[in-house]
Amino acid sequence: MIETEGLTRKFGPITAVEGLTFQVGRGEIFGLLGPNGAGKTTVVRMLSCLISKTSGEARVGGLEVGNARDALAIRKMVGLVPDNVGLYEALSAYRNLDFYGKLYDCPGPERAARIQMLLQGLGMWAERDRAVQTFSKGMKQKIAIARALVHDPQVLLLDEPTTNLDPEAARTVRDFILERKKDGKTVLLNTHNLDEAQRICDRIGVLKGHLLGVGTPQEMEGRAGRRQTVIELEQVTPEIRKAIRPLVASFREEARRLVVDVADPERENPALVEAVVRAGGRVLSVTAGGPSLEDTYLDLVRGSP
Ligand SMILES: Nc1ncnc2c1ncn2[C@@H]1O[C@H](COP(=O)(O)OP(=O)(O)OP(=O)(O)O)[C@@H](O)[C@H]1O
Ligand SMILES: [Mg+2]
């Protein structure tokens, strides 16, 4: 549904996106991860025909991005949640959606039914007659998500849709995205939330100007190749830190837990636990932690200039 080949965008001397080649199939949720300034928003803006590409190819539903004749059809096919919501503040939530629905030529009765379905799905139906300017950031974000879907687009381009949302609202939106996938929609999701990417994306791409890696969440996790032992203690003391430092390559602390990188857990764990106990540590649990998406992400991003 989305295909790019060598897609590149420059802003004067800055190359925001360079030689990007990837595909997203129909009904697939593809997550784009990457540090601030990596080019994620630029990709989404090119695909939704808001800005032009400098070179390379991009197709949405077989239509050429950058071809003036296809621009309108692409815009109809795509629902965009931009990084800044840009709603009409003085209008009510309902009126905002109704206005966009009209712009997209949705017929009246169908439009009303869709707006109701979307606002109910996002838990915003009761607020439909309030002016958007009286909404919190998260409430506005939900209206922007509803707006992106009002014309029933085949492709969703979501630029950090859950950034301003509380955990419950973020869950609502994630479930909502998964429902759209069930309807056969194709989703490109920009996010900084690795956990979110892992939970809902079929595949993930790590971007930093160019694509550093692509794979399923499981493939991406495994790529870091590290293994970890997690030791939960009553308390982590300086003595414990001192005792384990010579035994391991590296470790980090998460509250009362030591997360230790190990090459061979079966060989290293007994000595590790013994050292902790000898240093006065009271061990509550010892578990094996697998390599995480975060490890792979950090390896990729830090390893690239
Ligand atoms: N209109 C513009 N004019 C000049 N430079 C721009 C413009 N838009 C983006 N850039 C530059 O392009 C690069 C990519 O920006 P972009 O907004 O795509 O990153 P991003 O991955 O979305 O970052 P974030 O995670 O912070 O949202 C940055 O270096 C940015 O400064
Ligand atoms: Mg961005």
Image (cartoon, rainbow, N blue to C red):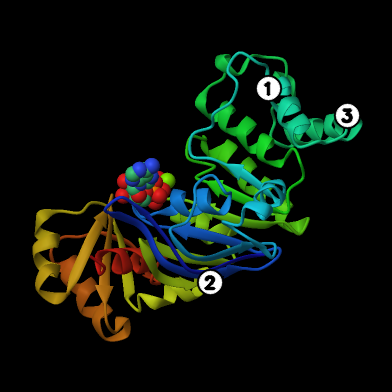
Q: Is residue 181 left or right of residue 144?
A: right
The span from disc 1 to disc 2 (Cα, nearest Å) is 37 Å
Sequence-wise, which precedes: disc 1 or disc 2? 1
- Residue 278 to residue 194: above or below: below
Quarter of the picture containing the N terminus is: bottom right
Residue 258, horizontal then vertical, whole percent: 26, 61
Sequence-wise, which precedes: disc 3 or disc 1? 1
Amino acid at pointer 2? Thr
Q: Going 24% across and 72% down the picture, which residue do you hit?
A: 273
Which of the two marks, 1 or 2, is nearer to us in this view? Answer: 1
Amino acid at pointer 3? Gly
Quarter of the picture containing the C terminus is: bottom left
Amino acid at pointer 1? Ala
Q: Which mark is residue 108?
A: 3
Q: Are marks 3 and 1 in contact (CB under 8 Å)?
A: no
Q: Is residue 258 left or right of residue 144?
A: left
Q: Is residue 193 in sight in this rendering?
A: no
SS class, disc 1: helix
> According to the image, label 1 marks what residue?
93
Which of the two marks, 3 or 1, is nearer to us in this view? Answer: 3
Q: Is residue 151 left or right of residue 58?
A: right
Q: Going 52% across and 70% down the picture, which residue do you hit?
A: 22
Quadrant housing residue 94: top right
Depth check: 71 or 276 in front? 71
Residue 223, horizontal then vertical, whole percent: 39, 77
The span from disc 2 to disc 3 (Cα, nearest Å) is 41 Å
Q: Are marks 1 and 2 in contact (CB under 8 Å)?
A: no
> According to the image, label 2 marks what residue?
216
Depth check: 209 or 215 in front? 209
Residue 233, horizontal then vertical, whole percent: 28, 57
